[in-house]
């Protein structure tokens, strides 16, 4: 495998872990501060990782990172962010639906229930969270991800590789601890 591809894999793995951690923080924030339900580990693993956010973020990056820069207009008004919002909300909703089925198959249940929300499907997905994910994707694609891209570029290829290996070892240990111990 050539060095460019290896570097990209390392880079995207770091993004995966980073966005999985941010997703975990978001979920914990909602539960403790907004809903005041108290703390619970919102990830499937033991550590502060919510992998569905990592997968969703990578998918949104791959699908829409370049698209967001296009200048699509309708009657003179730039509508690209609106299209990114709609497409990202739909993508996140599909990821969440698929994730619920995967979790149900592997664990017997999934970690959320949207039955209290209007316009829900089997409590797995709902309009309200889909809108929040679309808004989050706009903030993510236009503000957060460009900052992290600059940071990864600044730390260089060698440090990116080291960080990726360390994060992989931590994730592997978390998986072993969660499922085998």
Image (spheres, rainbow, N blue to C red):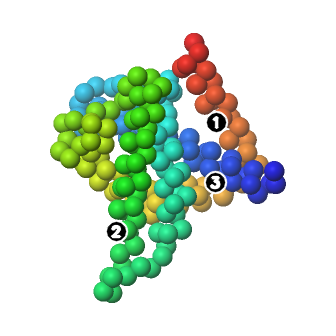
Mark 2 lies on residue:
82
Q: Is residue 41 above or below residue 23?
A: above
Q: Nearer the viewer, mark 1 or mark 3?
A: 1
Indicate which label's residue lies in the foreground, 2 or 3. 2
Q: Earlier in the sequence, mark 1 or mark 2?
A: 2
Would residue 171 appear left or right of 104 to someone viewing this image?
Answer: right
**Quick one: SS at disc 3?**
helix
Report the residue at 48% width, 31% height from top. 48
In this figure, which residue is indicated by the disc labeled 1? 167
Residue 32 pos. (x, y %): 29, 31
Q: Is residue 163 left or right of residue 77?
A: right
Q: Which residue is mark 3?
A: 152
Closer to the chain start, of discs 1 and 3, is 3
Residue 75 appearing in the image = yes
Question: Quick one: SS at disc 1?
Answer: helix
Could you tell me how many numbered marks the image carries?
Answer: 3
Q: Position of residue 22 (x, y in %)?
A: 45, 42
How far apart are the alpha carbons under marks 1 and 3? 14 Å
Screen quadrant of the C terminus: top right
CA gap, disc 1 to disc 2? 35 Å
Could you tell me how far apart the alpha carbons at marks 2 and 3 are, in whole angstroms?
28 Å
């Amino acid at each position: 495998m050539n060095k460019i591809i290896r570097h990209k894999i390392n880079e995207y793995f770091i993004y995966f872990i980073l966005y999985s951690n941010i997703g975990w923080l978001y979920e914990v924030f909602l539960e403790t501060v907004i809903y005041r339900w108290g703390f619970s580990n919102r990830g499937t693993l033991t550590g502060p990782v919510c992998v569905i956010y990592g997968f969703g973020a990578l998918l949104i990056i791959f699908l829409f990172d370049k698209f967001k820069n296009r200048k699509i207009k309708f009657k003179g008004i730039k509508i690209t962010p609106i299209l990114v919002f709609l497409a990202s909300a739909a993508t996140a909703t599909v990821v969440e639906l698929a994730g619920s089925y995967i979790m149900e198959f592997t664990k017997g249940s999934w970690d959320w229930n949207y039955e209290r929300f209007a316009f829900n499907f089997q409590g797995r997905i709902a309009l309200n969270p889909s809108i929040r994910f679309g808004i989050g994707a706009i903030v993510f694609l236009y503000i957060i991800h460009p900052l992290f891209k600059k940071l990864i570029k600044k730390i260089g290829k060698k440090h990116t590789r080291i960080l990726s290996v360390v994060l992989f070892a931590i994730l592997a240990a978390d998986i072993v601890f969660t499922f085998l111990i």
